[in-house]
Image (cartoon, helix red, strand yellow):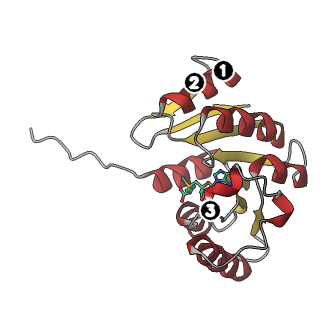
Amino acid sequence: MPLKPRVQRNKEQWLVEFILKHGHVYGAELGVQKGINLKYLVNHIPHLHMIGVDIWADKSVRWDGTKSEDLIHQKENINTEFYKDIVEFAKDNHPRVVLYRHFTNYAHKFVENNSLDFVFIDAGHEYEDVLEDIDCWYPKVKPGGHVMGHDINQPQVRRAVNEKLGEGTWNWAKKQKIWYKKK
Ligand SMILES: C[S@@+](CC[C@H](N)C(=O)[O-])C[C@H]1O[C@@H](n2cnc3c(N)ncnc32)[C@H](O)[C@@H]1O
């Protein structure tokens, strides 16, 4: 008997299925960049509300002492173009999309604890970045919601997730490189 071809879902499709399956309404994405993921989720899930956090800046701002409040004052560059584009998308989808052009370890102050159904961590990918994002954003997720992130195939991401959440306590969508844990 011929084998049925397996349908390969990409990261965005997998997330849409996951969010719908769990009835999630309020989410946040840390690390938005061009908004490929955020736009896909908002366009495919009519009831979804998303917070998007990104510096939309050259990565040097992470080390040169730039203050989060000053990220808004930048010279034109590719990231400012991405920002303008996603601001238009947020306007078109008001009030379902809220953007914070801030460091993730600053923007969490704008979000109430236990208010989100999920957070998707995909900003800085260094070990320390992931540790800090879990620290700052885990409290924002409601009990029963999901803490999730991307690129779990990267050893330093996996090390941080293991250290913060405990080895063997989280799940993995291997093809999509997504880790997730119910709170
Ligand atoms: C991998 S890209 C995000 C891709 C996006 N999640 C998607 O799937 O379409 C990572 C983004 O995180 C941002 N970023 C890195 N460190 C950050 C930090 N500490 N605070 C806010 N944004 C950060 C970068 O500027 C970059 O745009």
- Residue shown at 61%/22% (left/top)? 162
Amino acid type of disc 1? Glu
Q: Secondary structure at mark 1?
A: helix
Q: Are marks 1 and 2 in contact (CB under 8 Å)?
A: yes
Dot 2 surroundings within 10 Å: few (below 14), some, or many (20 or more)? Answer: some
Residue 158 x, y percent position in the rendering: 54, 28
Q: Pointer 1: what residue?
A: 163
Confirm whether residue 158 shows in the render: yes
Task: Kindly identify the residue that appears in the image at 58 percent across and 66 percent down.
Answer: 35
Badge 3: residue crowd in 10 Å (few <14, some 14–19, many ≥20): few
Residue 180 lies in quadrant = top right
Respond yes or no on whether mark 1 lies under 8 Å from ligand 1.
no
Q: Which residue is mark 2?
A: 159
**Residue located farthest toward the top when viewing the structure as drawn:** 167
Q: CA distance from mark 3 to mark 1?
A: 29 Å
Residue 73, located in which quarter of the rendered image?
bottom right
- Whether residue 16 sits left or right of residue 6 in the image: it is right
Q: How far from the left and from the top, in percent, is residue 120?
A: 64, 47
Is residue 100 rendered to the left or right of residue 48?
right
Residue 24 visible from this viewpoint: no
Q: Which mark is residue 58?
A: 3
Marks 3, 2: nearer the viewer: 3
Residue 138 left/right relative to 86: right
